């Protein structure tokens, strides 16, 4: 699976813009979004992530993210179309009025559409009725508004979804449906099914999540997944792999030690204390939690990608250079290129750093500055 294009009408800074991730009509495996502050890099990633989530057969108001201050991006977008290539065909996920659709004229038989319009007003209505309603207004008024919001959430599962020529994706869509019911089929790489994984710019840290025992590291299939330090414990993952899959743990350790650190390495798991021992090359040692913020960020990205990447995965990494020294910026980009080559995933990053841009200069650099300003 590869992202090909995103066509946007009226969303944030974009008025009527085509973001083309292809080159000579071919998908690209690794890309970088560049552009001044406010040129729309995060907007593009959020749109890709949220529109991709429309493939979730169990999508409900519970698995859409809401924020009291900022309305959901789907509700703030007039129209968007995300074209994805799957097995040589194009699946277009469309948000908004179908009269704006961009169709492939040459091969209409190879393009299918899933079109959602009603969802925008439903999300908007739910936000106004439930998410943003202030608590201190007159009680009866608040209750009435909230009740209407709850009614909206009931209607959500019967919202109108138009499908055109999606028969060509029947086997894929059936496998996705099935995986939501049959949890045992899914392994770390999501059982080969398409998925998207998003690293926000500001949430790449290691938190010590307290647990009484180490739960089995088995992931349910998620079509769109966002890294959050409160829901993912890196230490737990490493301890688990050391216990359950020693070969795999050795692979991860070698990979991290080769690509990530300078002057230190992961030595071993201190099993009695559930700890990851980091050793410096001059012989001192400490726990995972004492790493610097740049090292944490790198480690999280490297391990998540290493464990999950497959030909059907897309990774979005906002502000890849965040808290990274130039030497580490080079390291992370080299790591991404290597990983893409080994596993065949697609990686889209954004960056403010010329060091990062240089790696993408010849191909795969999308500069938004002139596109929108
Ligand atoms: N309704 C709107 N109309 C016009 N511009 C908007 C609207 N909503 C948001 N914007 C603009 O969109 C920009 C936010 O875009 P975004 O967060 O994608 O930028 P970015 O490229 O990620 O920037 P940074 O590098 O600072 O993270 C802001 O500059 C904001 O002013
Ligand atoms: Mg941004």
Image: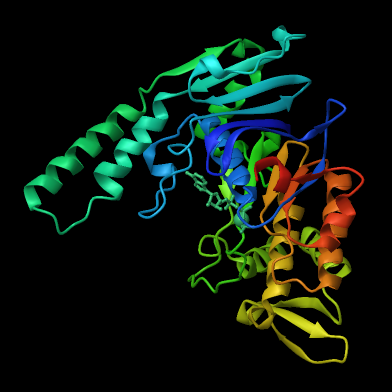
In this rendered view, identify the residue nearer to me: 125 or 246.
125
Which residue appears at 38% of the width and 55% of the height? 69
Which residue appears at 73% of the width and 57% of the height? 351
Count of marks, rendered view: 0
Which residue appears at 52% of the width and 16% of the height? 98
Furthest toward the front, the residue is 373
The image position of residue 347, as x and y in percent, is 76, 46
Q: How is the image coloured?
A: rainbow
The image position of residue 147, as x and y in percent, is 17, 39
Which residue appears at 55% of the width and 64% of the height? 229
| Horizontal arrangement in the rendering, residue 23 relative to residue 180 (left or right) | right
The image position of residue 146, as x and y in percent, is 19, 43
The image position of residue 252, as x and y in percent, is 79, 62
Furthest toward the right, the residue is 362
Asked whether the viewer can see residue 319, the reply is yes
In this rendered view, identify the residue nearer to me: 13 or 313.
13
**152 versus 340 height, above or below:** above
**41 versus 300 height, above or below:** above
**109 versus 283 height, above or below:** above
Residue 352, picture quadrant: bottom right
| Horizontal arrangement in the rendering, residue 303 relative to residue 216 (left or right) | right
Residue 296, picture quadrant: bottom right
* The N terminus lies in quadrant: top right
**49 versus 92 height, above or below:** below
Asked whether the viewer can see residue 219, the reply is no
In this rendered view, identify the residue nearer to me: 227 or 94.
94
């Amino acid at each position: 699976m590869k992202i090909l294009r995103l066509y946007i009408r009226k969303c944030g800074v974009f008025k009527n813009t085509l973001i083309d991730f292809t080159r000579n009509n071919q998908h690209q495996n690794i890309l970088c979004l560049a552009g001044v502050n406010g040129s729309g890099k995060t907007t593009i990633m959020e749109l890709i992530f949220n529109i991709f989530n429309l493939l979730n057969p169990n999508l409900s108001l519970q698995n859409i993210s809401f924020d009291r201050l900022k309305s959901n991006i789907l509700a703030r977008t007039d129209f968007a179309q995300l074209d994805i290539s799957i097995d040589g065909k194009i699946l277009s996920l469309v948000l908004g009025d179908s009269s704006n659709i961009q169709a492939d004229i040459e091969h209409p038989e190879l393009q299918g559409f899933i079109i959602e319009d009603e969802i925008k007003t439903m999300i908007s209505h739910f936000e106004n009725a439930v998410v943003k309603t202030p608590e201190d207004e007159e009680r009866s008024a608040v209750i009435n508004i909230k009740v209407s919001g709850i009614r909206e959430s009931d209607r959500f599962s019967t919202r109108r979804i138009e499908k055109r020529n999606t028969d060509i994706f029947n086997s894929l869509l059936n496998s996705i449906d099935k995986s939501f019911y049959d949890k045992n089929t899914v392994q770390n790489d999501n059982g080969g099914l398409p998925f998207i994984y998003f690293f926000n710019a500001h949430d790449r840290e290691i938190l010590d999540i307290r647990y009484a025992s180490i739960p089995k590291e088995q992931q349910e299939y998620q079509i769109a997944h966002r890294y959050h330090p409160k829901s993912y414990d890196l230490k737990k993952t490493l301890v688990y792999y050391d216990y359950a899959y020693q070969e795999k743990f050795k692979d991860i350790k070698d990979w991290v030690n080769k690509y990530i650190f300078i002057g230190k390495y992961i030595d071993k798991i201190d099993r009695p204390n559930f700890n990851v021992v980091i050793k410096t090359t001059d012989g001192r040692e400490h726990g995972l939690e004492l790493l610097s913020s740049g090292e944490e960020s790198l480690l999280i990205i490297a391990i998540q990608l290493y464990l999950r990447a497959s030909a059907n995965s897309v990774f979005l990494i906002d502000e890849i250079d965040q808290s990274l020294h130039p030497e580490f910026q080079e390291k992370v980009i080299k790591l991404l290129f290597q990983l893409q080559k080994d596993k065949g995933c697609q990686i889209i990053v954004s960056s403010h750093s010329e060091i990062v841009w240089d790696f993408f200069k010849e191909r795969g650099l999308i500069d938004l500055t002139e596109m929108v300003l």
